[in-house]
Amino acid sequence: MNGRMSDSLSAARNSSQINVVLRQNDGPTSTVQQIPIAASSSIANRAFPGQAQFTEVMQELDRMIGLDNVKELVYEIYALLQVGQYRSSAGLHSSAQVYHMIFKGNPGTGKTTVARIMAKLFQTMGVLSKGHLIEVERADLVGEYIGHTAIKTRELVKKALGGILFIDEAYSLARGGEKDFGKEAIDSLVKSMEDHKNSFILILAGYSLEMEQFLLTNPGLPSRFAIQLDFADYMVDELMQIADLMTKEREYTFSNAAEMKLRQHLASEKMTSLTPFSNARYVRNIIERAMRHQAVRLLQQHPHPKQPSKQDLMQLRPEDIRFEKKAGLF
């Protein structure tokens, strides 16, 4: 890719830290099949013995832009689970282990989407019985009085059994100090991880620095999360690929001038923004805003009963691409 130097530095700063602990799943082996994967993917041209459902899971992941370290991790998980089946068939020891994870990164980097794909992966491989995702935040876990938090947390863990419990902005549980009920939620989660260690997967997600500080609040937390995965900010070229996919899904296109305007803005925003960049979420908001401005423009240019052409209905022009005032562009 030919993104700006700042993108390269960002990618280097956010290189992945992956420690994997996996359990095996007993079951029959099957023939080897090749999954059609884009050549740019870090898991291209690799063999995937197993069910056709796993092929679908991998194709869903591969359609996501970037995330090479995530795709590599998923392949490692699959490979170790499959080899675990081979070891079991050969009469070799293969012990059950846990898969709780930490996802660290800015908003819009695909953490929730990857969690959903992970749930499907583990269900396909027989690790999880249901493969569903329960997504919660602090307000869903923390109660209003002593003992209430533990009850709420246990109920959510119960709903997540057989699947994944995904807690976004998990670091907020530790922000209230010793007297805050968030600490009770953390203690309840740690106990549930031990009581139901093979029945569900807990994924804690949030900003990188905040999550690292959060792990220090309970001495039992770091060792319980064998997989810690960084989701780096997207580079400009990757953001433009995401924008292209989003517009195509909605049956819109960018004019050349509109595409250039968006690219220049994204490069500037990534370099100058004083707040965490929201990545794909930021791009989606721009596109949806552009669709609204395009609709207004078309109604003004084509008063009823005159109708715009199909090309006019699809094309987003530079005047449709507008940004928030803080970006300095309108």
Image: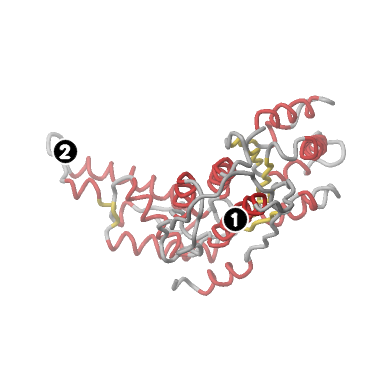
Q: Is residue 9 above or below residue 276?
A: below
Q: Residues within 10 Å of mark 2 (few under 14, many from 20)?
A: few
Q: Amino acid at mark 2?
A: Pro
Q: Is residue 227 left or right of residue 279?
A: right
Q: Which mark is residue 276?
A: 1
The residue nearer to you, when weighing 235 against 179, is 235
Instruction: Give how far across and how far down residue 261 sits, in percent.
Output: 36, 62
Q: Residue at x 35, y 53 (%)?
A: 321
Instruction: Tell us which disc is closer to us: 1 or 2.
Output: 1
What colour scheme has been applied to the protein in the rendered image? secondary structure
Q: Quadrant of residue 241?
A: bottom left
Q: Amino acid at mark 1?
A: Pro
Q: Is residue 6 above or below residue 150?
A: below
Q: Residues within 10 Å of mark 1 (few under 14, many from 20)?
A: few
According to the picture, the residue beneath numbered tag 2 turns out to be 303
Q: Residue at x 87, y 40 (%)?
A: 178
The residue nearer to you, when weighing 42 against 95, is 95
First in sequence: mark 1 vs mark 2 = 1
Q: For the residues marked 1 and 2, what is the alpha-carbon distance in whole angstroms?
A: 42 Å
